[in-house]
Image (cartoon, helix red, strand yellow):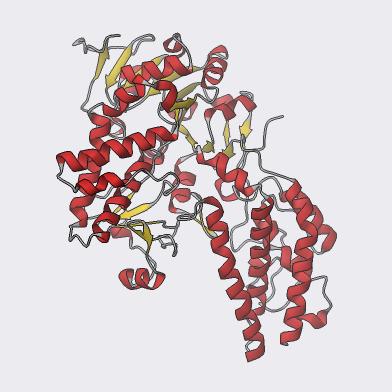
Amino acid sequence: MAPLSAPLSGLLTQGKASLLCRHVLKASHYFGGVSRGRSELLSRLSISAQTDCPSSLCSSSAENLRSVYNHTKRHTQDVMPSISSASVDPDTIFANNEMSLRDIEVYGFDYDYTLAFYSSHLHTLIFTIARDILISKHRYPEGLRDYEYIPNFAVRGLHYDVQKALLMKIDAFHYIQLGTVYRGLNPVPDEEVIAMYDGCHIPLEIMSDFYGKSSHGHSMKQFMDIFSLPEMTLLSCVNDFFLKHNIDYEPVHLYKDVKEAIRDVHVKGIMYRAVEADIGKYICYGEQSHAVLKKLSEHGKKMFLITNSPYDFVDRGMNYIVGSDWRDLFDVVIVQADKPSFFNDRRKPFRRVTDKGALLWDRIHKLEKGQIYKQGNLYEFLRLTGWRGSKVLYFGDHIYSDLADLTLKHGWRTGAIIPELRKEIKIMNTEAYVHTISWIQALTGLIEQMQVHRDPTSQAVVDEWIQEREAMRPQTKEMFNRHFGSLFRTYHNPTYFSRRLSRFADIYMASISCLLNYDFQHTFFPRRTPLQHESPFGQGQSPPGQFDPRTPSSHRC
């Protein structure tokens, strides 16, 4: 049986929702319906406990507030064993937008981190080579050689303030997540961050442009692909070196030099040659790519590959992952496409490439199976193939370079490959995470309801709860990454990365192997989650501080 699909907003909620709901219903009979999201149900956990309390506990005395707190905590602990027994399947395909595979006739793929997945050795290689280029080409101090790649320092989706030399995580509403701002390898105190930015909000005019780049006055660069992890780490290490040695430097020049060094690793072929020479070290798995491609081919689906990587590199990798017959599976293969320019620049024609890498001069009238093409542009691709609109599903790992233009301008359906999903879901399934996030949700409900009691003793109790909540929130962050937390959340809000993912990807998954769990008649449905002004149960509302047994806390005005 195929795993259930789910939307981005329900990533942290799927799997345990119905189970939790059954236990909440047992504890509180006021629910008029069942929500499908774990977070929505968790947000009602404290309220379901409170409605079982005697009405006297709803008064504003400190003693009664503490009684409500204790009752809520006991209730949360009572339902935890059953909640923890359920889990989210990491092989699920999650849906942001309704999409049926029966409508898909053509499947397209990126190569890097879509068909081929790399080991951490590749990040170390990129970091080391780029660091040495800074020293040899840009005359950076020899002392930089003491720095090595730091696994798990950064997560993708982070923003870098080019002018201030700060790496940070920003949420979907352009707010900085305090505690995730780094200068070099050290966190910047919250007070200093607030002083520098006059608060925590980043104005739209200095955010990165549409493709996440720092250009045309935008001082923020967003790092969206997995290849950017070594670049973020190198930026942080170089900043750290200059700060430790009290070396005065221009942050903009540093950013540009690191960017150029990273580009040299790719453009000059240094990385490609190293991977080809020891492919077993750098390509760690193919995630059953061959099985997926074979399944699509057997069902008569058209397939194409569009990658920025050169042919020799792709051919070596695909031979290792899929086999020597890999080209027989694809109807069109395009290398060195120069995405995202490929999707917008109409000027570049396709060129045919021989098996030995030579470029031919002939005019291309048709993209033929078995041939290899270089560069080109999407408009010519659409004209030559006729593969337009929602019958095409394209998979890639880069939200901007691979997906944004395709869905906004050309109507293709898009699938994002997010390898980090597996790790994050495993963490979400742990007892420690479920217990912590459940109590945070319950405690938030208590604070929301009891904040209206303004007498000093009651306010003192509520302040204790607020301090407890604030102390617990970093614990959930550090479960994912001790510096920057989850790829998908800034505490309760989605990250800026999540916002773009939900906008540009119809579906998303940890790898294309997840397709093996579904047949070609399957329809992916996003979860319907209530808007903030909607009541999922069609019931009325009551003012804060008054317990209406019909209404969950998030919908009380």
Q: Is residue 257 above or below residue 251?
A: above
- Which quadrant does the C terminus fall into? bottom right
Foreground of the two, 385 or 434: 434
Query: For this rendering, which residue is in front, 430 or 121?
Result: 121
> x%, y% of residue 127?
32, 39
Question: x, y percentage for residue 411?
Answer: 43, 34
Give the x, y percent position of residue 312: 32, 17
Q: Quadrant of residue 261?
A: top left
Q: Residue pushed farthest bottom?
A: 456
Residue at image point 67% right, 75% down: 449
Name the spot of residue 262 as percent of width and height, x first: 27, 38
Q: Nearer the viewer, residue 4 or 377?
A: 4
Residue drawn 36% across the image and 56% down it: 185
- Please say whether residue 232 is visible from this viewpoint: yes
Total labels: the figure holds 0
In the image, residue 353 above or below residue 431: above
Task: Report the residue at 47% width, 17% height from top.
Answer: 302
- Asked if residue 519 lies left or right of residue 329, the reply is right
One can see residue 60 in this view: no
444 vs 17: above or below: below
- Relative horizontal placement of residue 519, taking residue 265 as reference (left or right): right
Image quadrant in which you'd find residue 2: top right
Q: Quadrant of the N terminus?
A: top right
